[in-house]
Amino acid sequence: MVDIKEVAENIYLIDNRLYGIPKWGSVYLINESKKALIDAGPTTSVATVLEGIKKIGVEAGDINYVMVTHIHLDHAGGAGVLLESMPQAQVVVHHKGARHLVDPTRLVSSVAETQGEKAMRMFGQVAPIAEERVKPVSGGEVIDLSEKQALRIVAAPGHASHELCIYESRNNGLFSGDAIGISVLENEVVLPVTPEPSFDLEQYLDTLERLMALGASRIYFAHFDASGKVQENLELARNKLQAWDKIIARAIAEGGLERAAEEFRAQLLRELEPVRKRKSLYKYLTDGIIAMNVAGFIKYYQGKSKS
Ligand SMILES: [Zn+2]
């Protein structure tokens, strides 16, 4: 059975059981006279998302927009297959990511290269999307769903260059994708995610500042839940990035990149300790996210030392 929850007026969270893990992946449905899905999830969770939409009482065929916060496959990989059940829907995506949804060949090979074949099996196939169904945006655009609900696109680079947040006017809420990071265990652990190839520390920090200035009263995290502690969560993400940066810079100066990777890995393990009580999530985070964060940060430093 799929778990759904109304997290704000006319906004539903569908737990898409990402990689079979409960409370790890959220797809949101905004149910106004026009309807929008925020993120698609990977192809392996499409059936769960469709079941969730049905449970909310909405016809998939009535959905107007599938808005992907970025093109990482856990957010956008399932969009192509999902669209087969949504004949009216357009996909809204950052212009830098648009062509990779139309022809996913390069996206898929880059993910296979950085994350391996096992990850590709967890995402499933990535179906191409007809170009006329893709609506590229770059930030500042407004999409009206009803008289009371206007969605504003906010460019949010840092986690990825093609990251978007979506501000919704009815509840003064912000769909944050991965721009802030993950928030698990009912918001007990908030952690920025810094994957290669496009993690950029300065951009990430700048995005967090701009999100603080929006004055939203809730955040809808893609991983995993809605939170009312907006400024607190944003500050926590900023403070962590700055603290990690210090740890890594010092370790590089003292013992090089390898030493930095080791110390950063140990730091992340300490920060994830509270998640140990959620077995499957803890395993995924300690196997997956730690390696991702370390690789992304180290690559970012390598790039800096070259320039
Ligand atoms: Zn991501």
Image: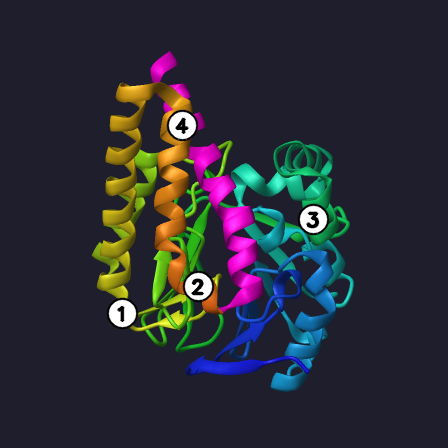
Name the residue that disc number 1 marks. 229
Boundaries of the magenta span = 278-307
Image spot of residue 29 (x, y percent): 55, 73
Q: Residues within 10 Å of mark 4 (few under 14, many from 20)?
A: some
Name the residue that disc number 4 marks. 300
Sequence order check, earlier mark of 4 and 2: 2
Say above or below: 172 vs 268.
Answer: below
33 displayed left or right of 256: right
Sequence order check, earlier mark of 4 and 3: 3
Looking at the rendered image, the quarter that the C terminus falls into is top left
Looking at the rendered structure, the secondary structure element under dot 2 is helix
Measure how far apart labels 3 and 1 are at the Cα level. 39 Å
Residue nearest the observer in this picture, 45 or 138 = 45
| Residue 294: in magenta span | yes
Say which quarter of the image contains residue 15: bottom right
Image spot of residue 222 (x, y percent): 48, 61
Q: Residues within 10 Å of mark 3 (few under 14, many from 20)?
A: few
Residue nearest the observer in this picture, 165 or 91 = 165
Q: Given the image, on which type of amino acid does mark 2 rest?
A: Val
Q: Mark 4 or 3, which is nearer the eye?
A: 4
Measure how far apart labels 1 and 2 are at the Cα level. 19 Å
Image spot of residue 224 (x, y percent): 47, 66
| Residue 225: in magenta span | no
Residue positioned 36% across, 62% down in the render: 189
Residue nearest the observer in this picture, 34 or 57 = 57
Q: Given the image, on which type of amino acid does mark 3 rest?
A: Glu
Q: Given the image, on which type of amino acid does mark 4 rest?
A: Tyr
Mark drawn on residue 132:
3
Say above or below: 201 vs 190.
Answer: above
Residue nearest the observer in this picture, 257 or 10 = 257
Image spot of residue 58 (x, y percent): 64, 82
Name the residue that disc number 2 marks. 275
